[in-house]
Structure formats: structure tokens, C-alpha cells
Amino acid sequence: MLVLQFCLTTSVHPSAVVSDSVNIEHGTVIMAGVIINPRTSIGKGCILNTGCTVDHDCTVKDYVHISPGSHIGGTVTIEDYCWLGIGSVVINDLHIGPHCIIGAGAVVIEDLTGYGQYVGVPARKLK
């Protein structure tokens, strides 16, 4: 059996603003215009796309995609394999469970349990 071993690199665009106290795991890409504020942790294999913001004391777990223009308030936790659509907003002090898809322009104002698609203002789970 052939086993390939490799290490994914982390890439941060020079125009991104990332606090010195942010922890970024391997394989994560931070695009142009991203702002990440202090004491935030970004997991492995994440994409923080153009112009998104992640405020203070957040935890973004593994393989999360935060689309362009999305804004995450302070002390938010986003579990593994979530996707936040273009221009989505998550207010402070919330928890987003694993495997959530948040639609473009959705506004999350309460905890999401995970495993579903959430759309609208305020964001509601699609049936």
C-alpha cells in the first residue's frame, strides 16, 4: 500500500490584518482584506475569504469556510465543517454546531445545533 505524507502550508495574504495573539493551524488560507482580532483560534484547513472579519475571542474549528464579506462577532464558536455564505453575520456569544451551512446574507442571532441549512433574517433552519 502506498501512503503519501505531506504537510499543508498556511497562507496569509499581506493585506490581511491578524492580531499577534491569534492561533492559526496548518492548511488554513487567509485571503485579502480579512481582519482577525485578538485571542481567536482558527483550526486546520479553513478558508477565511476576502474581506471577512472575525472578532475577539472566537474559536473557528477545522475545515470551516467563511465566505467573502461575512462578519463574526466576539466570543463565537464555529464547529467543524461549517460554511458561512457571502455576507452572513453572526452576533456575539453564539455557538454554531458542526456541519452548518449558513446562507448568503443570513443573520444568526441564536445558537445553531448543526447539521442543516440556515437562511434568512433571522436565520432559520430549512426543512
Image: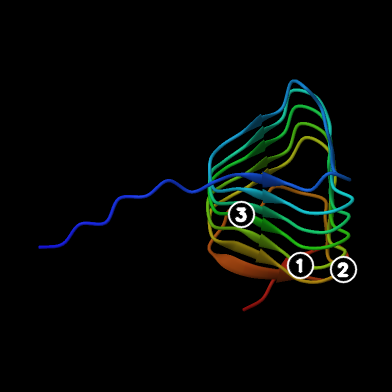
Q: Secondary structure at mark 1?
A: loop
Q: Quadrant of residue 126?
A: bottom right
Q: Secondary structure at mark 2?
A: loop
Q: Residues within 10 Å of mark 1 (few under 14, many from 20)?
A: many
Who's the residue at 60% across and 58% down the image? 82
Residue 85 showing in the rendered view: yes
Residue indicated by mark 2: 105
Q: Residues within 10 Å of mark 3 (few under 14, many from 20)?
A: many
Residue indicated by mark 1: 85
Q: Amino acid at mark 3?
A: Val
In primary-sequence order, the first of circles 1 and 3 is 3
Q: Amino acid at mark 2?
A: Gly
In primary-sequence order, the first of circles 3 and 2 is 3
Residue indicated by mark 3: 64
Label annotation for residue 66: none
**Horizontal side of residue 35 vs 49, given as left or right:** right
Q: Secondary structure at mark 3?
A: loop
In primary-sequence order, the first of circles 2 and 1 is 1
Disc number lying in front (3 or 2): 3
